[in-house]
Amino acid sequence: MANTRHTSTSASGTRAARWALAGAAAAVLAADQASKCLVMAHATAGSYSTAPLSIGLAANHGATMGAGAGSPLLITLAALAVAALAAAFALRATSRTAALLLAAVFGGALGNLADRLLRAPGIGTGGVVDWIHLNIAGHGVSLNIADLAIQLAVPAAIAATLITARRTTRRTANNNTPATTTTANFALAA
């Protein structure tokens, strides 16, 4: 009897894989929200040092580095789109590593989206809580765990996807050796 079991080409093809993706997203979301709560309880807004790395409280109503701060609803819709795309790509990724990294992006996007939806001044206009301040050559950047997950996991997921595609291409090329080469090798051996 022929084996008719359907095999999935995505890394999230099994129930366990989907749980792993959900766990990765939930871990990033939880770490992001817990760290923001801790900093909000103990830090003063805008109090950063001139050190290369410091902790302080800031609200970002825009995207990365404050871009689009004047359009909070547009930024909220963009954050929602990023979350949806990250989830879709995580479920369709062919590399387990890329799928887990994209799940981390999804968790980070949810963390920042939660701030935009639930924090003051209102639904869809809230500011993202940034608390990690980097001061490099006089240029300050404020971010949080969600931002780190997004900004580090996206290029890593792209790299993992490219590496997996390259390995698959090599495997396919090695398995599709021309029949004439095999025949010639047998002829020389005779």
Image (cartoon, helix red, strand yellow):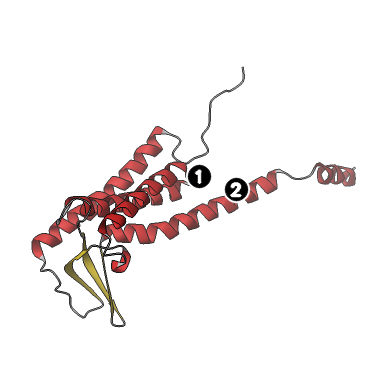
Q: Residues within 10 Å of mark 2 (few under 14, many from 20)?
A: few
- Cβ–Cβ below 8 Å for labels 1 and 2? yes
Q: Residue 165: percent from the left, percent from the top?
A: 57, 51
Residue 149 against residue 57 in the figure, above or below: above
Report the amino acid beneath label 2: Thr
Which residue is at 33% across, 47% downward? 24
Q: Nearer the viewer, residue 148 or 14?
A: 148
Q: Is residue 32 above or below residue 70?
A: above
Which secondary structure, mark 1? loop
**Given the image, on which type of amino acid does mark 1 rest?**
Thr
Residue drawn 31% across the image and 82% down it: 137
- Which image quarter holds the C terminus? top right
Q: In the current view of this chain or complex, which residue is farthest to the top? A: 1
Q: Tell which residue pokes out farthest to the bottom in this image.
A: 137
* First reached walking from the N terminus: tag 1 or tag 2: 1
> In the image, residue 36 lies at what x, y percent?
18, 58
Above or below, 32 against 176 in this view is below
**Residue 54 falls in which quadrant of the image?**
bottom left
Choose top left, top right, bottom left or bottom right for residue 4.
Answer: top right
Q: Tag on residue 168?
A: 2
Label at residue 94: 1
Q: Quadrant of the N terminus?
A: top right
Q: Residue 138 appears at what percent x and percent y?
A: 28, 82
Callout 1 crowding tier (Cα within 10 Å): few <14, some 14–19, many ≥20: many
**19 or 73, nearer to the observer:** 73
Please tell me in which quadrant of the rendered image residue 60 appears: bottom left
- Return the x and y of residue 18 as percentages of the image width and height: 38, 38
